[in-house]
Structure formats: structure tokens, C-alpha cells
Image: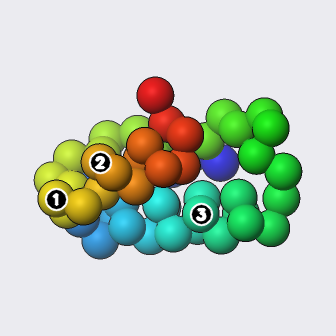
């Protein structure tokens, strides 16, 4: 999935969708993207790490 997300709410929605997809599908070949992830919540960097973003 590829998201354009600006602001804490947009990034949260994108990460929630990616998390839901990961729980329902294999995570062996993850290529999800969140572009323009500006003004994120303080907890979101850890969520990016947990979901395998580099």
C-alpha cells in the first residue's frame, strides 16, 4: 500500500490500515509506504519500526 499522509491523524489512519493488512496477510514481502509523513504523533516512530519500515 502507498499512502500520502500529512498530520497525525492521516499517519495514524495509514499505520492502522497497514497494521490490519499485516495481521491478515503474510509480512514476508512488505513494501508499504507512507509518503509526506509530516507532523506525526510522538508514538508513531515506534509504530513505523514495529511495522518493519526502515
Q: Which one is earlier in the sequence, the residue at label 3 or at label 1?
A: 3
Disc sitting over residue 42 in the figure: 1
Mark 1 burial class by Cα count in 10 Å: few <14, some 14-19, many 20+: few
- Residue at the outermost top position: 54
Q: Which one is earlier in the sequence, the residue at label 2 or at label 3?
A: 3
Q: CA distance from mark 2 to mark 3?
A: 14 Å
Q: Depth check: 44 or 13 in front?
A: 44
Above or below 52: residue 44: below
Above or below 21: residue 45: above
Q: Which residue is mark 3?
A: 19
Q: Secondary structure at mark 3?
A: helix
Q: Which residue is mark 2?
A: 45
Task: Say left or right for 15 vs 6.
Answer: right
Task: Say left or right for 40 vs 16.
Answer: left
**Residue sitting at 78 percent across and 34 percent down?**
29
Pointer 2 with pointer 3, Cβ within 8 A = no
Above or below 28: residue 3: below
Pointer 2 with pointer 1, Cβ within 8 A = yes
Amino acid at each position: 500500500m502507498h499512502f500520502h499522509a500529512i498530520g497525525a491523524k492521516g499517519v495514524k489512519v495509514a499505520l492502522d490500515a497497514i497494521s490490519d493488512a499485516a495481521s491478515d496477510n503474510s509480512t514476508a514481502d512488505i513494501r508499504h509506504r507512507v509518503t509526506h509523513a509530516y507532523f506525526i504523533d510522538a508514538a508513531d516512530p515506534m509504530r513505523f519500526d514495529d511495522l518493519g519500515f526502515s
